Image (tube, grey):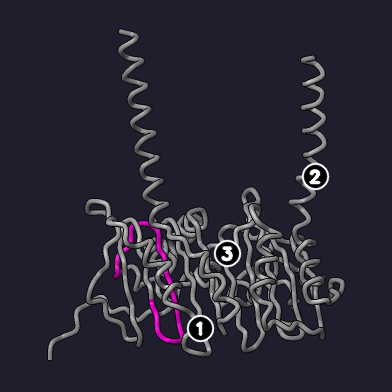
Amino acid sequence: MRILFKTIKLASLALLLGLSVSATARAQNAKIELGQLDHLGSKASETVDVNIDERLMQITAKFLSGKDPDEVKIKQLVNGLKGIYVKSFEFEREGDYSQADIESIRSQLRNPAWSKILNVSSKKEGSIEVYLLTNASQVDGLVVLATDPKELTIVNIVGPVDLEKLSQLEGQFGVPELGIETKPKPKN
Amino acid sequence: MKRLLLSTVLLTVLWSVPTLVEAKGDDFGALVKVVEEFYDVKHKGIPFLAKSGIKTATAAARLAGGSKKRLAEAGSVKLAFFEDQEFNARGSIANFRATLKATLAGRWLPFIQVLSLNDGAQTYVFLRDAGPKYTVLVVTIEKHDAVVVQVNLAPQTLAILMQNPNEMGKAITDDATTTNDQE
């Protein structure tokens, strides 16, 4: 009986460990590699690079006031998020960044776990691609790749996030104004 | 044999502890040196204004349009000033950034970098866990001036500043170099 109890205890521990490792692995997958774009900093006229990891996200969620209505709103917004990473480059000339630079991002998003959201429109000019990392019905991460001939912006949010949340994050935590419209345009 | 092994391990531990503490504690000095060597400039001592700012660290300061407490914890500010010198950023930003990151690698999180070639402005903010508080290192470089600041922040203050990371470096630098009289 004692051996059976020990076996069950060990099996439960192994299961718990497996689950936590799998959750960590998913979170890690949602964070894409952006360091390969650092070389663009020498060509760009403006560069912004923001790294807010899980610990820093938790500080925001934990230490903002639960009474101030604005801070309560932000607390709810960042609740569950595990990181926000932004790289943004503005160039004086067209062609200062290459297709290979964009491909280094897209190639990481070809994994079947990532899906490209089609028909995302923006008030801004240029192209905006939005990718979601989903696991069953849960979203584990998001990547926005915004390009125009003189600008390249990548936003990577790790954790449960959707377009609505993304639009609320614009202008905060280093997330630039992307102008993404979350509601369909009315038909004329 | 066992005794010899134990003594060797103990000696190694005792020898390495002060080195680690010293390396961790001197990152501010290391960054000031990086700026000096990279741009061939010399820093000045802590100006009088900054000193009085530190002494009155509990007084009210203006931040983000509202009246808040001073950001930095009293007595936690380290400051180095570079005034009226040449900081030519063109062609060297990437190298300078890489040198800064390498100097602090593994000990500090590179939180935000905002670089502008047009006006030669560079802002770097690095963060480190310091028990219940957070230590923040800010390097701000403009065409003719630069400031290196290290401060301890309460997590509540950090949480507020993180909402607008692009302005965080400026807010901390202004806070460390402003006296009550100037507010």
Q: Position of residue B4 (x, y in %)?
A: 82, 19
Question: Disc 1 designates what residue?
Answer: A96
Check disc 3 and report the residue beneath it. Answer: B111
Mark in front: 1 vs 2? 1
Residue B156 visible? The answer is yes
Q: Earlier in the sequence, mark 3 or mark 2?
A: 2
What amino acid is found at the position of numbered circle 3 in the picture? Phe
Mark linked to residue B19:
2
Q: Is residue A18 left or right of residue A86?
A: left
Choose top left, top right, bottom left or bottom right for residue A160: bottom left
Real-space Cα distance between discs 3 and 1?
Answer: 26 Å
Q: Nearer the viewer, mark 3 or mark 1?
A: 1
Residue B94 percent across, percent down from the top left: 64, 73
Question: Depth check: B116 or A106 in front?
Answer: A106
Numbered circles on residues, count:
3
As shown in the figure, which amino acid type bears the numbered disc 2?
Thr
Mark 2 surroundings within 10 Å by alpha-carbon count, few (fewer than 14), some (14 through 19), many (20 or more): few
For the magenta stretch, what is the residue range? A146-164
Q: Amino acid at mark 1?
A: Asp
- Foreground of the two, A141 or A93: A93
Q: Is residue B108 left or right of residue A81?
A: right
Q: Is residue B129 found left or right of A118 in the rendered image? A: right
Residue at the image point whose x is 47% and y is 88% from the top: A94
